[in-house]
Image (cartoon, rainbow, N blue to C red):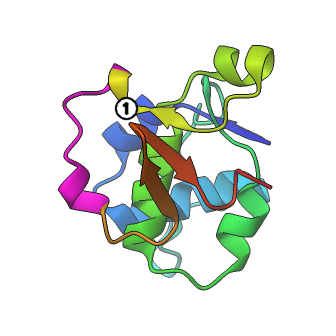
Amino acid sequence: MLFFNLQLLEAKSNSDKQICEALHNLYKQKLIKKNLRDSSLIIPGLKHGNSFLINPKDLFKNNINFVYVSQYIKLAGRRSYLHYAEYGVRYLDLSYYPDLNLEAFKFNYLLQISNDKIHFKFEEN
């Protein structure tokens, strides 16, 4: 399991690719300094948050388009850890987020939308 601060991640990242890189670097627990030759993004304090991924290994080990991974991270990061810990809820309940534009990620094969819930491909195992 990987905990992270979604608000900080979105604030410090300028693109979907940077979101993926920053969280992947946190997952690898590398402390790479950003320099001219290394475009890796390290965000101090990113690991201090309530957002979580249950199976980050599966998400990062595959060669998946960073736009799909970024959408996955942003949506998974909105879930309640309390609901997961107490009741085993792995999906995102859309009733809490009526402002989400479902059209923006309806083609993301990492997500399954059904009955006002978003299920995450690598979180269901």
Foreground pick, 117 / 10: 117
- Disc 1 marks a residue whose amino acid type is Leu
Would residue 120 be visible to someone looking at this image? yes
What element does badge 1 sit on?
helix
- Residue at 64% of width from left, 25% of height from top? 48
Q: Is residue 43 left or right of residue 85?
A: left
- Residue at 68% of width from left, 51% of height from top? 26
Q: Mark 1: give few (<14), some (14-19) or many (20+) Cα within 10 Å.
A: some
Foreground pick, 122 / 113: 113
Q: Is residue 63 above or below residue 9?
A: below
Residue 123 inside the magenta-drawn segment: no
Q: Is residue 39 above or below residue 96?
A: below
Q: Position of residue 117 (x, y in %)?
A: 46, 39
Q: Position of residue 74 (x, y in %)?
A: 43, 46
The answer to which image quadrant residue 100 occupies is top left
Q: Magenta part of the protein: which range?
A: 96-105
Residue hosting label 1: 94
Q: Is residue 37 above or below residue 40?
A: below
